[in-house]
Amino acid sequence: MYNPRFEKETFKKEVKQNVKHLFRKEIEEVSQQELYQAVSYAVKEAIIDNWIATQKQYEKDDPKIVYYMSMEFLMGRALGNNLINMTAYTEVKEALEEMGVNLNLLEDEEPDPALGNGGLGRLAACFLDSLASLGYAAYGCGIRYRYGMFKQKIENGYQVETPDNWLVNGNPFELRRPEYAKEVRFGGNIRVEYDDKGKIHFVQQNYESVKAVPYDYPIVGYNNNVVNTLRIWDAEPIVDFQLESFDRGDYHKAVEQQNLAKNIVEVLYPNDNHYAGKELRLKQQYFFVSASLQAAVAKYKKHHDDIRKLYEKMTIQMNDTHPTVAVAELMRILLDEEGLGWEDAWEVTKKTCAYTNHTIMAEALEKWPIDLFSRLLPRVYQIVQEIDRRFIEYVRKTYPGDENKVKKMAILRDGQVKMAHLAIVAGYSVNGVARLHTEILKNQELKEFYQLMPEKFNNKTNGITQRRFLMHGNPRLADWVTAKLGTKDWITDLSLMSGLKKYADDPEAWKEFMEIKYKNKEFLAAYILKHNGIEVDPRSIFDVQVKRLHEYKRQLLNILHVMYLYNQIKEHPEKKLLPKNLYLWCKGFSRIYSGEGDYQAYQFRCGCGK
């Protein structure tokens, strides 16, 4: 994919210009972070050309747009990934080398965008990558957390969480789009009005509100000039500062809107084991869902007149239960703002919303206390009540006299709003993320819903993008795969990897493969020595996991296994064990388990090297 901006002399000139304009310095004077910024803005210029062209093409073609709604997007670092997808990594690397700059070191200057937590967020990021690479029109919709995934330390044997201020130096790849800001309302009460034709209207009053301001983040498709958008919403006060309240001495009133806006986007997944935490999390969910839907409907209406055909041009994919308030919010917009009747609005909603289930754990299927939900989202709650009433009526007609079915399937039950039930009742598609997972949903956890609506259930097995996790993450192995397959087409068609099967019993291929593995282990050993001050043997077994320690994650099982091995060594010191390194990189906390010869030992270090 040729782009004249990546010609060496052109790119070097642009980097130098960015250094001058951004920092008022010469190239020799800048820090590594400043140089990272200058290079990123040069790459962004090339991205924006394609970004504009992509959006113009979408306007011309008028395709159906996917709005992928998720509380998390674990995007990973953008600089290297964007260069790979633009097939410009080698050119830029060589251009920077001619300037005496190491691209790998620059990539280390980029913080991870702290917009996600783990698997759910990484799946969302990979979906966006795939959608762009396949040329589908799509928006990711989420929150621009100021402090995202926390940094973890272990002090005196206890986990300590510290904020991850990933925006401290700004984000060179994002664009602030204040022209698309939306108002999001919380609380208050609903007043019923009738117009001169006797039509009922529901008016929210005495509410508090914030301004949702979008920041657009480019999602670059692989080698196809397509650039889609991740739209993450920041919160700002509707009124910056209430001087009148301040003059009266009501200081808290004067800044309450600022505080409301600040709290909503302050941190990813606030602690919700108390009422205030639950309220903030629900506010977060409604905040980005409402803003995203308002923007999506406005975009549709810009080129289409009939709101009843909304589903022909947009679909809402709800990534787990967190964004499923979208069902009732879309109904609210269609009923209260677009003037549709219930039947028409419900028909549109049923054909627009789809739901991805990520877990069979009951505690992970969100349920909101009715008193909290109704107080914070009064009109949305009224709509959920009516959805539930009509659905229960349908269940009773289908299963006369079987109140157990009603009990198991009701949206409102036991003082709770059951969000997964809302998503299933309204969605045209319900998918699990692995074949076994989907079968468990159908036959156990959501059995009643499957029996009632089998046509909705399907499976979409989780996947990851080979472009980041092989091409970028392991370039030596990627080159070997290309050489063995005789093609680079695996970069967009991972099924071609099956062509490696013929080398399974090839001694020469195994030798090459193990050499690549050893070189990578040497690289990691050098990294550990530099960052942790611990020398490990590259010939030992490496067991590396990247995730926070968590009570039900495999990292905990690995630690328990370490304890088991430790007891084995204590009880049987004569027993010979294979040297092994266990490296748990836990966003700030790591544990090195190293061994030499006939003995093994534990060493504890913080992953940030402190």
Image (cartoon, rainbow, N blue to C red):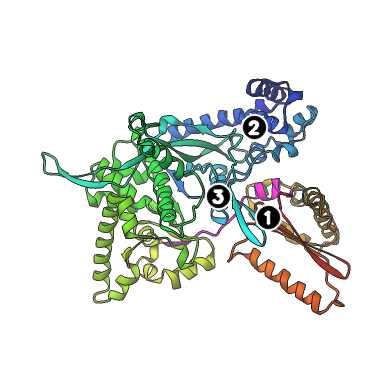
Q: Are marks 1 and 2 in contact (CB under 8 Å)?
A: no
x and y percentages locating residue 235 in the rendered image: 44, 39
Q: Which residue is tagged 3?
A: 116
Tell me which corner region of the image, top left, top right, bottom left or bottom right, holds residue 207: top left
The N terminus lies in quadrant = top right
Residue at (47% x, 63% y) in the render: 364
Q: Residue at x 51, y 29 (%)?
A: 52
Q: Secondary structure at mark 1?
A: loop
- The Cα atoms of the two marked residues, 1 and 3, are separated by 18 Å
Above or below for 337 versus 35: below
Q: Is residue 406 visible?
A: yes
Instruction: Answer whether residue 461 is magenta in the image.
Output: yes
Closer to the chain start, of discs 2 and 3, is: 2
Residue 42's spot in the image, x, y percent?
64, 28
- The quadrant in which residue 210 appears is top left
Q: Which residues are magenta?
A: 457-474
407 in relation to 174, above or below? below
- State how far apart marks 1 and 2 are (Cα): 29 Å
Specify the amino acid type for callout 2: Ser
* Disc 3 packing (10 Å; few <14; some 14–19; many ≥20): many
Nearest to the eye among marks 2 and 3: give it: 3
SS of the residue at dot 3? loop
- In 3D space, how far apart are the residues under numbered discs 2 and 3 (Cα atoms)? 22 Å
Instruction: Identify the residue at horizontal 81%, vertical 66% (top origin).
Output: 601
- Residue identified by numbered label 2: 40
Residue in front for this viewpoint, 525 or 343: 525
Q: Which residue is mark 1?
A: 589
Q: Nearer the viewer, mark 1 or mark 2?
A: 1
Depicted 459 relative to depicted 139: above or below: below
